[in-house]
Image (cartoon, rainbow, N blue to C red):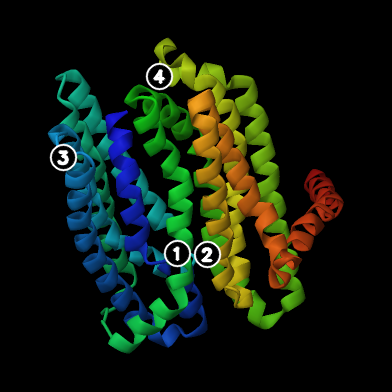
Amino acid sequence: GLLSYGTSIISFFTTISILGLDGVVVAEMVRSPEKETSYLGSALVMRFIISCLSMVAIYGILLVLEPGNKLLRTVTMLQAVAIAFQASEVLYYWFQAKLKMKYVTIAGIISLTAMAGWRIVLLAISAGIEWFALSYSISACVCGIVTCFFFFTKAKLRLRFIYNDAKYLLKNSYHFIIAGLAVTLYTQLDRIMLGKLVSSEAVGFYSAAMTIAVMWELVPQAIINSARPLLMKKYTIDYNEYQKQFKILLLGISIMGILVGVMFTLFGRTAIFILYGKSYIDAVPVLYILIWSTGFSMIGTARIIWLVSEGLNKYAKHFTLIGAVVNIILNALFIPIWGITGAAVTTLISQLVVALFAPTFFKETRSFIYIYIGSFKMLPDIREKIIKNRQKDSY
């Protein structure tokens, strides 16, 4: 619970340090490949500077919010070091644009393995919580080193910082900075409010359920990252084909979300017992609710491709600000009554509002709802193609 409480505070600044560049840089590199060295170099410098400033701000906030809690400050700052190492994530954009995400996946596997090994050792020697907090920074450090190695051996580019390019990227990404902050607000505020209104143990139960609920997101996130450069390029060549492929992406994510939701509704209790033990039984009903919210979250993530391609970046912040307002109001109402279950219900409603209701509030974005609904009309065609392919394979 203490680790999760600290992580919730850090998350706000992690979002700021990303600067909303993840979708914008890939799109600009696809449009202007000759400027990839300056776009990547400028983004990397900006992220590192903001990351260092964020660490200072986190410490200042902890002194104000928890002046007497030295352990919380120590644990949180040990985790916050990861923000600086995560600046290397800028290099992911090159791998996305070149459709070489396997190297990013390898880097992630290596870092997670290193963190798992570190935690096993800590459990064996009964180490203090401070050492567990450091595991996040160790994972980010290892991932950053491996990513840099792959980048400089595969890309062989000399990165440059150019002020005008940095200014241009920020001009196009600030909408996503605000959107990211709003998302972080309504995904982390529940934990902060639980810590203040209920207990740190409640944060621990909620975080355990959330950790399991978001595990499957690695798959759709990888698909979205791989599809982003392809769809953005297709947009400039064949708009009808772009829309068709985007609908297929939305349909695939929706089907995955439904299947995962059903699976965890049936076997979520077993998953909690296996991973955390019977002492975490209070996390079971929370998992049943949160697992359905993740599907809506992935739809919102995929929608960023559509917003960037259509030049509707500014609406990203409007959607998430609407979700943040809904989240704050419902958390204030539900947490005092239902505790962690109330926080889970609030998250589900907030994700649903952001994914499918918020776009209807604006004339320019209502077409997304028609696109999303239209994606399900493609299901018979896709089913027919699968059957035909199976018949060909049988011959």
Q: Which residue is mark 1?
A: 178
In the rendered image, residue 281, in percent from the top left (x then y), is placed at 47, 14
Nearer mark to the viewer, of 2 and 3: 3
- Distance between the Cα atoms at labels 4 and 3? 32 Å
Q: Which residue is mark 4?
A: 276
Report whether residue 98 is seen. no
Count of residue discs:
4
- Distance between the Cα atoms at labels 2 and 3? 33 Å
Viewer-proximal residue, 186 or 95?
Answer: 186
Q: Which residue is mark 3?
A: 67
Crowding around mark 2 (Cα neighbors within 10 Å: few <14, some 14 to 19, many 20+) is: many
SS under mark 3: loop
Nearer mark to the viewer, of 1 and 4: 1
Q: Amino acid at mark 4?
A: Tyr
- Distance between the Cα atoms at labels 1 and 2? 5 Å
User: Marks 2 and 1: in contact by CB < 8 Å?
Assistant: yes
Q: Amino acid at mark 2?
A: Lys
Image quadrant in which you'd find residue 285: top right
